[in-house]
Amino acid sequence: MRVLPAIQDPTSVAQPSNAFDRFLLQFIRDPRDLPFIYLTLRISFTLIPLGILLFIPAISGAFWWAIAAAYLITYFIYKGPFGLMGHCAAHRPLFKREYRWMSYYMPTVMALFFGMTPETYVGHHIGMHHPENNMPEDLSTTMPYQRDSVRGFLHYLTTFLFTGVFTLVGYLFRKNRQKMALRAMSGEISFAVMCGLLLWLNAPATIVVFLIPFVFTRIISMIGNWTQHAFVDSTDPANAYKNSITCINVKYNRLCWNDGYHISHHCRPAMHWSEHPHFFMKTLDKYASNKAIIFDGLDFGQVFFLLMRKRHDRLAKHVVNLNGTFQNEQEIIELMKYRLQPIHEWSEAPAKKAVTV
């Protein structure tokens, strides 16, 4: 275990410094979101043109394969920053009211090249995940599973891949969020129709540009949600400090807009990404009193793979011991193992068999 180190995650955004910066500021609500506009421009002039080139019949052979490799490399470079930019924009509208039409470009055009179907992310994350907070009505809840189990995760993943959109649309209709339900349903259908037509026109390009990112993005999304909500206290599962984790001092936070601060995100979903480290430092006593699990130097991906290997000892070495909450690493390991157990009984939970090893 570790004492709380100095926070190295980003806490501010560079001030506008030139005429082009000032030009862009007229369109956005918060000057701190200027990096999102530059990321949008970079993707628009690199990833998207590469994807379009793959559909041009005159390009073939080794040159086509070189472009395909460049496309996938660019996708992997931008996948995390883009996905979490979309996450931030879903909670905090990026553009001013008079330029609201610009907000459709990210989730309906750019998202296609990252395998994200239009509107389904907003329906899932804003319409369902946050209102339900990983509780039983959250269709991506981790509660019924042994959360350091490979078999449990594979069941969780395949359930989401094959039935997730259907159960999401049903949930949104049940909750009288018809507009979100219709958008999610139409987004999924339109993506499927688009891919079907493009497969007929150019199957190799469609697989590279849309289908590989589609599968990979959904797998990564579920790895993220599984890990963010891997440690859940069965006596207080709705408490964000006891059903989420926080990862500090990792490169991931610099690349992906402090996404590692998942506890504070559930506490304050609309808080700007640059404010999370300050909020974390101001509320340390709250983290300590709830025995919140904070990892220093591990990101969600690293936590996930250590969980799948059941390396609780390695995880415990990275847990921050706030206010002397834990006497030793064995106490941390026992707490983690307790919070990883499937939650079989909960007064509001539907009957659902846990998948364990």
Image: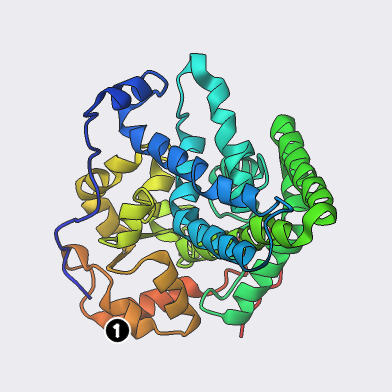
Q: Secondary structure at mark 1?
A: helix
Residue placed at 55% from the left, 55% from the top? 134
Q: Position of residue 234 (x, y in %)?
A: 50, 65
Res 142 visible: no
Residue placed at 85% from the left, 55% from the top? 200
**Which image quadrant is residue 279 in?**
top left
**Which image quadrant is residue 35 in?**
top left
Q: Which residue is mark 1?
A: 330
Closer to the camera, 53 or 163? Answer: 53
Closer to the camera, 42 or 320? Answer: 42
Residue placed at 28% from the left, 71% from the top? 319
Closer to the camera, 234 or 88? Answer: 88
**Which image quadrant is residue 271 in?**
top left
- In the rendered image, the quadrant that contains the N terminus is bottom left
Q: Amino acid at mark 1?
A: Gln
Q: Position of residue 149 (x, y in %)?
A: 56, 80
User: Is 184 positioned to the left or the right of 330 in the image?
Assistant: right
Q: Position of residue 295 (x, y in %)?
A: 31, 67
- In the rendered image, the quadrant that contains the C terminus is bottom right
